[in-house]
Amino acid sequence: MLRQPLTAITGMLAALLLFVLSGPVSAQSASEAEAFVQREAQEVINALQAFHDGELDESTLRRNFRDRVDQLADVPRITGFVLGRFRRGADEAELEEFRTVFREFAINVYERELGNYAGQTLDVTGSVTRAPGDFIVRSTVRARGNGEDVAVNWRVMSGDNGLRVVDAEVMGVWLAQTQREEITSIIGNAGGDISAATRALRQRTR
């Protein structure tokens, strides 16, 4: 069974993460990657605060939220990575069903959990360039009141659609790798049947 995300940020990126290191990469800078994380992640937090303040209705929030997910995360890369070796040679219709259900799983978890961060501030504190177009962006989610700040590292990669988040580290755990291990375990225990993971995720979105 997939483990329940520990925080709003983990909830978001358990659904958004994971990468396949393939395809053309454009040479964007570390400063651009930092600005991307600062802008896109804070926009989501601000929208949630607007909802809590009564400035956005629920339907508008959900519609904007789904658009923001696609701006922030590279969902196709994420779904490819979580399937690991089982992606190779798989039936395309089966893969497409998994991608669809995985995205909904991610969005549902994000919507349930991220409300905890409404009104908080995300501060980017620096970055490391791993390779051209491949960055680790460091940030801190500043807590309200007596809450504890949360350090989050974001792996950001550049591709055909610009910069996208492909993984994140919260409390020392890289979430993409964790989700990959859990999903490939489900598929492996089912004799390589990807639909077993699809069914497990679908159960979690009901």
Image: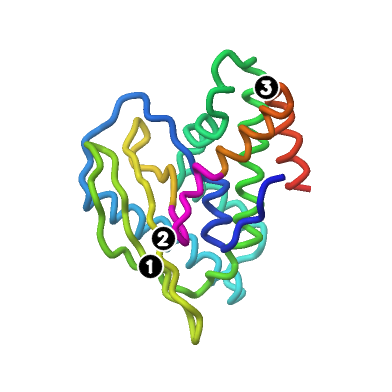
Asked if the residue at tag 3 contacts the one at tag 1, i.e. Cβ–Cβ closer than 8 Å, the answer is: no
Q: Mark 3 and mark 2: span between their CA atoms?
A: 33 Å
Q: Amino acid at mark 3?
A: Gly
Q: Would residue 48 appear left or right of 202 to someone viewing this image? A: left
**Residue 175 shown in magenta:** yes
Q: Residue at x 49, y 50 (%)?
A: 68
**Residue 64 shown in magenta:** no
Q: Amino acid at mark 2?
A: Val
Q: Residues within 10 Å of mark 2 (few under 14, many from 20)?
A: many
Q: Mark 1 and mark 3: span between their CA atoms?
A: 39 Å
- Which residue lies under the disc numbered 2? 152
Asked if the residue at tag 1 contacts the one at tag 2, i.e. Cβ–Cβ closer than 8 Å, the answer is: yes
Q: Secondary structure at mark 2?
A: strand
Residue closer to the observer: 66 or 129: 129
Q: Residue at x 35, y 45 (%)?
A: 156
Mark 2 or mark 3, which is nearer the start of the sequence? 2
Q: Residue at x 61, y 47 (%)?
A: 106
* Residue 58 in picture, x, y percent from top left: 66, 62
- Which residue lies under the disc numbered 1? 140
Residue closer to the observer: 55 or 46: 46
* Residue 196 in picture, x, y percent from top left: 74, 30
Residue extending furthest bottom?
A: 145
Quadrant in which residue 20 is drawn: top left
Residue 120, labelled with which disc? none
* Residue 84 in picture, x, y percent from top left: 53, 28
Residue closer to the observer: 17 or 41: 17
**What are the residue bounds of the magenta stretch?**
169-178
Q: Would residue 134 appear left or right of 109 to someone viewing this image? A: left
Q: Residues within 10 Å of mark 3 (few under 14, many from 20)?
A: some
Q: Residue at x 38, y 67 (%)?
A: 140
Q: Residues within 10 Å of mark 1 (few under 14, many from 20)?
A: some
Vertical order, 92 against 31 (above or below)? above
